[in-house]
Amino acid sequence: MTKHDTVLQVENEARKVLGDRAQEWMRKPSKLLDGMAPAELATSREGARVVLVELDRAKTPLRATAGKRHP
C-alpha cells in the first residue's frame, strides 16, 4: 500500500464519520495528534492507525459522569 493509498483510506473513513467537515479536519493541525494535521500523519501506516483511532473515538459520544466519583 502506497502513502497515497493510506491517506485515501483515512480520508474515506473521515468522510464516513465527519461528513462534509472531513476535508477541513484532515488538513487542520490537531492538538490530539501533537499538532500534526491528520493528512500529514496518515502518510505512514503507523500514523494512519493513530488517525483512525481518533476517528473511531469521534464515533462514540462521551457519556457524562456528573455526580459519580470514582476512587
Image (spheres, grey):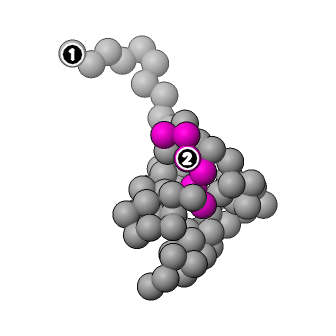
Residue 20 versus residue 66 in the image, above or below: below
Residue numbers of the magenta segment: 34-39
Task: State the residue in front, 35 or 57.
Answer: 35
Instruction: Report, in whole angstroms, how far the alpha carbon at label 1 lies from the one at label 2.
Output: 35 Å
Coordinates of residue 54 in the picture (x, y in percent): 48, 51
Q: Inspect this view and state whether residue 56 appears.
A: no
Q: Quadrant of the C terminus?
A: top left
Find numbered disc 2 in the image and state the secondary structure of the residue it sits on. Answer: loop
Coordinates of residue 15 in the picture (x, y in percent): 67, 66
> Which residue bears the numbered disc 1?
71
Who's the residue at 42% across and 56% down the image? 50
Task: State the residue in front, 54 or 43.
Answer: 43
> Which residue bears the numbered disc 2?
36
Coordinates of residue 62 in the picture (x, y in percent): 50, 38
Asked where in the image residue 53 lies, by quadrant, the reply is: bottom left
Coordinates of residue 9 in the picture (x, y in percent): 55, 75
Who's the residue at 78% across and 60% down the image? 20
Residue 30 part of the magenta-drawn span? no
Task: State the residue in front, 41 or 19.
Answer: 41
Give the residue type that dot 1 points to.
Pro
Find numbered disc 1 in the image and state the secondary structure of the residue it sits on. Answer: loop
Give the residue type that dot 2 points to.
Met
